[in-house]
Amino acid sequence: MRVVCLRGGFGLDQLVLEERPDPVPGPGEVLLRMRAASLNFRDVSIARGTYDPRLALPVVLGTDGVGQVAARGPGGTRFELGERVCPLFARGWYEGPPTRATARSMLGGPLDGTFAELLVARDDDLVRAPPELTDEEAATLGCAGVTAYRTLFELARVEAGTRVLVIGTGGVASFALVLGHAVGAQVIVVSRSAEKLRHAQALGAEHAVNATEQPEWGVAVRELAGGEGADLVVELGGAATLAQSLRAVRAGGTVALIGHTPDGSHTPSLVPVVMREIRVQGVLVGPRASFEAFTRFLSQRRVRPALDRVFALAEFRSAFETLARGDAFGKTCLRIAAP
Ligand SMILES: NC(=O)c1ccc[n+]([C@@H]2O[C@H](COP(=O)([O-])OP(=O)(O)OC[C@H]3O[C@@H](n4cnc5c(N)ncnc54)[C@H](OP(=O)(O)O)[C@@H]3O)[C@@H](O)[C@H]2O)c1
């Protein structure tokens, strides 16, 4: 089988497509023939060595994907041959908050990930893909999708009328937009691109704020959010955008810290957190229970992920470069098997 892996060192130019022996499922495991995978910014950070400079190599990249059950290990499993399933972001994390083991169990670093033609997984570490979604759509759910779902509906309580600020228009951001819109939340999107903002409005964003034209966008957002500020900020820029997010959120509102810059520079003043009783909520994707609740939500509400470009597995380098440039609106995918 072929895999996209980081072998000789860090850097996007160190990514290679290499041949590996086909894996064989053991007891309680299934063999997945991967159909599609999607990229997360995490994959770019891992490849560059900024996510974890001590990460042991070689490692197969990719956190998100969908595969078809091609073989079952001895003793049977809860999945039938041919079923489409998505691997969990972190093996063994089924419910509740993350534990110390979670960081050691994440796909695409430190464990081998989804940018592979074949993948072996325990059946407990898999979730059925929603049948109405295409392979590419189903391949976007496990990391970006679960992160947005858990932020909006489990760590916060977004409902009709909740004012939600979303930073950017990438994978997590586009999910936060379409999920918030689906329940009638008032979603405000901040982006550096006028074209992406038009796209966000077509998907239901109530207000669009151009961060290039208005670098001090925090005050503009506060005004658009009823003058008091947003109830929830889906914070994806980390230290680079946090100061504006703290201006944009209402007193007593929540800033969900999801994205982060690796060097920790530009740390903003945390005085507003105290003075305005802002709740700061860290988010790390989510466990299997969140993924399963998310797939039910998608099917019931008929919500679909926002897809950008789809590349063939052999074009992985172009896919990484697209993400690294920040060009995409929504998710960038890899097609692994023929439709
Ligand atoms: N904690 C977690 O569980 C978790 C899960 C998933 C992702 N993340 C993190 O969340 C962030 C987004 O991940 P993703 O996979 O959604 O990324 P992505 O699809 O690559 O999107 C990146 C987004 O960031 C914006 N952006 C790019 N460069 C920027 C800059 N210099 N300043 C401000 N905004 C910039 C872009 O929006 P515009 O072009 O529209 O401005 C784009 O929406 C990353 O930091 C990632 O590591 C964390």
Image: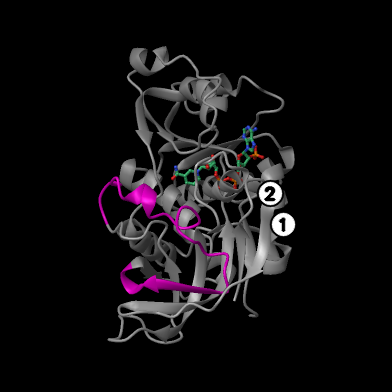
Label tally:
2
Label 1 close to label 2 by CB (< 8 Å): yes
Left or right: 239, with 7 as reference point: left
Q: Residue at x 63, y 46 (%)?
A: 10
Q: What residue type is disc 2 on? A: Leu
Say which of 152 and 80 sits in front.
80
Left or right: 82, with 104 as reference point: right
Work out whether 146 lies above or below 210: below
Say which of 101 and 249 sits in front.
101
- Residue 111: say if magenta: yes
Position in image of residue 310 (x %, y %): 68, 64
- Residue under label 2, please give it: 12
In which quarter of the view is residue 155 placed? top left
Work out whether 79 lies above or below 151: below
Residue count near mark 1 (Cα–Cα under 10 Å), binned few <14, some 14–19, many ≥20 = some
Q: Residue at x 55, y 59 (%)?
A: 305
Circle 1: element type:
helix
- The magenta span reads 95-124
Position in image of residue 214 (x %, y %): 67, 23
Q: Earlier in the sequence, mark 1 or mark 2?
A: 2
Specify the quadrant that holds the N terminus: bottom right
- In this view, the residue farthest toward the left is 96
In which quarter of the view is residue 280 placed? top left
Residue count near mark 2 (Cα–Cα under 10 Å), binned few <14, some 14–19, many ≥20 = some
Instruction: Tell which tag, 1 or 2, sits nearer the viewer.
Output: 2
Work out whether 205 lies above or below 88: above
- In this view, the residue farthest toward the front is 8
Left or right: 293, with 118 as reference point: left
Position in image of residue 45 (x %, y %): 58, 43
Specify the quadrant that holds the C terminus: bottom right
Q: Residue at x 40, y 71 (%)?
A: 121
